[in-house]
Image: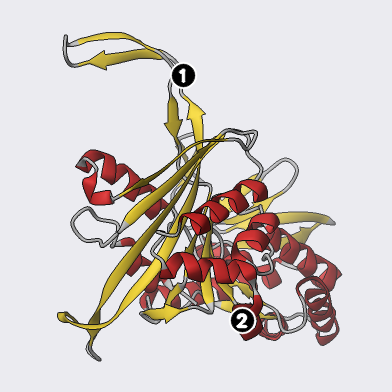
C-alpha cells in the first residue's frame, strides 16, 4: 500500500525537467461514447507550456487524502494469475504503452465503464523512475539506484464548453468578445499501476483516484482494475455515524462522540509526524475500547461492535478520516449550529436544567456576536 511519502515521491516526477515519460496516449470521446480522435505524443516534443498542462493533470490524479480521494487496492495472488484486467495493465506497463491494441482496449473499457455527462479526454502515460538509493539516515544518493520503477498513470477528464465573454488580447491591448470553446477540466477519475510501496514496485497493488468521494465507481473498478470496489468514504462516514447511534442508543452521549473524535485526532497527529506511516485505521475492537473508557456500558459497546461488523464486515478496519472529521467538531440542533476547534471539544458539554436539554460552551476568551464584542 502506498503512503503519503510514496505518493509525494511519484508526484515530484511530473516536472518538465525531471521525468522519463516515454509517451502520452490520449483519446477524445463524445458523451455518447463515440471516439472523436486519438493521439500518441512524446512529451519532450511538445512546447513546454503545453507539456506543463499535461503534467498538471497527472499530478492532480495523485492528489487528495488517502482513504478518501486516493484508494489503495490490493490484488490476491489468484487475481494476479487469472484476472484479465490485471493482465492488461501488466501488458500496458511492460510495453510502455507502445502496444496499440492494448491501449485501444484500455480506452474502450474505460468508455464502457463510466457515465459521461460531457465529452471526455482519456489520458495515459508511462514513466520509468530511476529510484535513488536511500540510506538508514533518510538521505538519498542520486548516484546510486535501487531499481527502475516502471508504471502507468491514467486520468479521465471532462471536456466542457466554456462560456463566451470578454477577453484581453495583448496584440492590440484591448478587450474583445471571445467565443465559447472546449476546455479540458481537472480529472474526475484516474489510476496508477503498479503501486509504489516502500519505494519499490508492487504488482499486487494499485492506486485509484476519485474526485467524488461519494461514488464507489463500481463498473470502472471492476472493468479497469479487476478487483472489488470499496465503500466510498462519504458513505463510510455516514454509515459509521448510524452504527454508532444504533449500537449505543441511549448511551450515545456527547462524551462518547468526543472520545471517538479525540482518538482520531491523536492518530492523525502521530501520522503527521511520520510521513512513512499509513493513515490510521481502526477496528471494531479499537473503537469498542475507546467507548468503554468514555463510560459506555459493556452491553452497549458489544451492541456497537455487532452493528459495526454487520455493516463493514468481520475484522474490517476504517480509515480514521472516515470515522470522524479532523478539521471540525460540529454540534447541531434544528435551529442552531455550533462549530468548535476539534482540539477544544472539551469546551462543549450537555446539561439538563429544569427538565430542559442544554448545550453549554465554556467561554473563557472573548466573545463576539455579529462582530460585536459582548460582555458577561
Query: In x, y percent, where is residue 71?
Result: 55, 66
Query: In x, y percent, where is residue 112?
Result: 66, 48
Compare residues 53 and 81 and report the one nearer the observer.
81
Q: Is residue 30 left or right of residue 275?
A: right
Q: Label 2, on which residue?
A: 81
Residue at 70% across, 86% down: 285
Q: CA distance from mark 1 to mark 2?
A: 49 Å
Q: Is residue 274 left or right of residue 303?
A: left
Q: Nearer the viewer, mark 1 or mark 2?
A: 2
| Res 337 visible | yes
Q: Residues within 10 Å of mark 2 (few under 14, many from 20)?
A: few
Residue 167: quadrant of the picture: top left
Secondary structure beneath dot 1 equals loop
Q: Label 1, on which residue?
A: 163
Q: Is residue 75 above or below residue 20?
A: below
Q: Is residue 228 left or right of residue 150?
A: right
Residue at 37% across, 61% down: 126
Compare residues 75 and 23 and report the one nearer the observer.
23
Q: Is the residue under label 2 in contact with that under label 1 (CB below 8 Å)? A: no
Residue at 51% across, 59% down: 102
Amino acid at each position: 500500500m502506498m503512503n503519503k511519502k510514496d505518493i509525494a515521491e511519484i508526484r515530484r516526477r511530473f516536472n518538465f525537467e525531471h521525468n522519463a515519460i516515454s509517451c502520452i496516449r490520449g483519446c477524445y470521446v463524445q458523451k455518447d461514447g463515440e471516439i472523436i480522435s486519438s493521439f500518441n505524443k512524446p512529451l519532450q516534443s511538445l512546447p513546454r507550456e503545453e507539456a506543463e498542462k499535461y503534467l498538471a493533470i497527472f499530478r492532480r490524479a495523485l492528489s487528495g487524502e488517502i482513504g478518501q480521494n486516493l484508494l489503495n487496492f490490493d490484488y490476491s495472488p489468484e487475481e494476479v494469475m487469472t484476472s484479465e484486467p490485471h493482465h492488461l495493465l501488466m501488458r500496458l506497463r511492460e510495453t510502455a504503452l507502445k502496444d496499440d491494441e492494448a491501449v485501444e482496449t484500455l480506452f474502450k473499457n474505460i468508455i464502457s465503464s463510466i457515465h459521461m455527462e460531457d465529452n471526455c479526454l482519456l489520458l495515459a502515460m508511462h514513466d520509468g523512475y530511476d529510484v535513488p538509493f536511500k540510506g538508514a539516515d533518510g538521505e538519498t544518493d542520486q548516484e546510486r539506484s535501487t531499481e527502475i520503477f516502471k508504471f502507468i498513470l491514467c486520468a479521465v477528464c471532462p471536456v466542457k464548453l466554456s462560456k463566451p465573454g470578454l477577453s484581453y488580447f495583448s496584440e492590440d491591448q484591448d478587450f474583445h468578445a471571445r467565443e465559447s470553446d472546449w476546455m479540458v477540466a481537472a480529472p474526475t477519475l484516474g489510476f496508477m499501476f503498479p503501486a509504489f510501496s516502500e519505494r519499490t514496485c508492487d504488482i499486487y497493488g494499485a492506486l485509484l483516484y476519485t474526485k467524488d468521494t461519494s461514488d464507489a465507481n463500481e463498473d470502472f473498478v471492476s472493468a479497469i482494475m479487476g478487483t472489488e470496489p470499496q465503500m466510498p468514504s462519504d458513505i463510510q462516514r455516514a454509515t459509521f455515524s448510524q452504527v454508532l447511534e444504533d449500537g449505543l442508543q441511549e448511551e450515545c452521549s456527547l462524551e462518547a462522540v468526543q472520545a471517538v473524535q479525540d482518538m482520531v485526532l491523536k492518530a492523525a497527529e502521530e501520522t503527521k509526524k511520520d510521513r512513512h506511516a499509513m493513515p490510521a485505521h481502526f477496528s471494531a475492537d479499537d473503537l469498542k475500547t475507546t467507548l468503554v473508557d468514555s463510560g459506555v456500558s459493556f452491553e452497549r459497546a458489544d451492541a456497537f461492535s455487532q452493528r459495526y461488523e454487520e455493516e463493514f464486515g468481520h475484522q474490517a478496519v476504517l480509515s480514521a478520516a472516515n470515522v470522524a472529521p479532523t478539521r471540525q467538531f460540529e454540534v447541531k440542533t434544528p435551529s442552531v449550529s455550533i462549530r468548535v476547534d476539534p482540539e477544544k471539544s472539551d469546551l462543549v458539554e450537555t446539561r439538563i436544567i429544569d427538565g430542559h436539554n442544554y448545550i453549554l460552551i465554556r467561554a473563557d476568551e472573548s466573545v463576539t456576536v455579529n462582530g460585536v464584542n459582548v460582555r458577561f
